[in-house]
Image (cartoon, grey):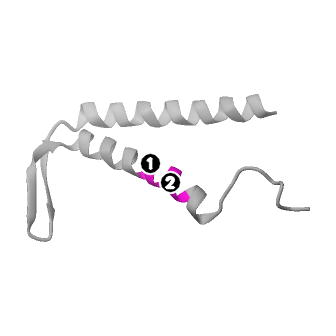
């Protein structure tokens, strides 16, 4: 059953990567990011989406152990 879950996870990741690549190709228009008074250089929209997803994945991977979420169910005895 664990191999089936791994297969499903790999398929989901593959679909996300394909969607990001498709959006990046179709949206090559440069955008300027602004935060309060700070302004970045112009970068392609697809790259902004890719970085946002990467930061989200890394952030959730860091937050899971810190918040006590785990995939094991050994705590329910």
Pick the quarter of the image with the N terminus.
top right
Contact (CB < 8 A) between labels 2 and 1?
yes
Q: Give residue 65's position: percent from left, percent from top.
A: 59, 57
Residue at (50, 54) in percent of width and height = 62
Look at the magenta stretch and give its main secondary structure: helix
Tell me which segment is drawn in magenta. Answer: 56-63
Could you tell whether 5 is left or right of 63 in the image? right
Out of 9 and 62, give the one closest to the viewer.
62
Residue under pointer 2:
62
Residue 75 picture quarter: bottom right
Secondary element at tag 1: helix
Rendered location of residue 68, percent (x, y)? 65, 63
| Label 2 packing within 10 angstroms: few (<14), some (14-19), many (20+) | few
Whether 36 is among the magenta residues is no
Where is residue 2, by image quadrant?
Answer: top right
**In the visual, does 70 lie left or right of 64?**
right
Local secondary structure at mark 2: helix
Q: Residue furthest front?
A: 66
Residue 40 is situated, as x and y percent measured from the top left of the image, at 10, 53
Q: Which residue is mark 1?
A: 58
Task: Determine the CA span between mark 2 and mark 1.
Answer: 6 Å
Give 12 or 55, whichever is nearer the viewer: 55
Does the magenta-highlighted stretch encompass residue 58? yes
Give the residue drawn at x 41%, y 35%: 19
Q: Horizontal placement of 19 versus 49: left or right?
A: right
**Residue 44 left/right relative to 15:** left
Observer-nearest residue: 46 or 37? 37
Number of numbered labels in the structure image: 2
């Amino acid at each position: 059953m664990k191999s089936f879950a791994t297969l499903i996870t790999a398929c989901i990741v593959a679909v996300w990567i394909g969607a990001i690549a498709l959006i990046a190709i179709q949206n090559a228009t440069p955008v300027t990011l602004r935060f309060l008074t700070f302004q970045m250089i112009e970068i392609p929209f697809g790259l902004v989406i890719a970085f946002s997803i990467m930061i989200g994945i890394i952030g959730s991977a860091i937050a899971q152990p810190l918040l006590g979420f785990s995939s094991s169910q050994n705590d329910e005895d």
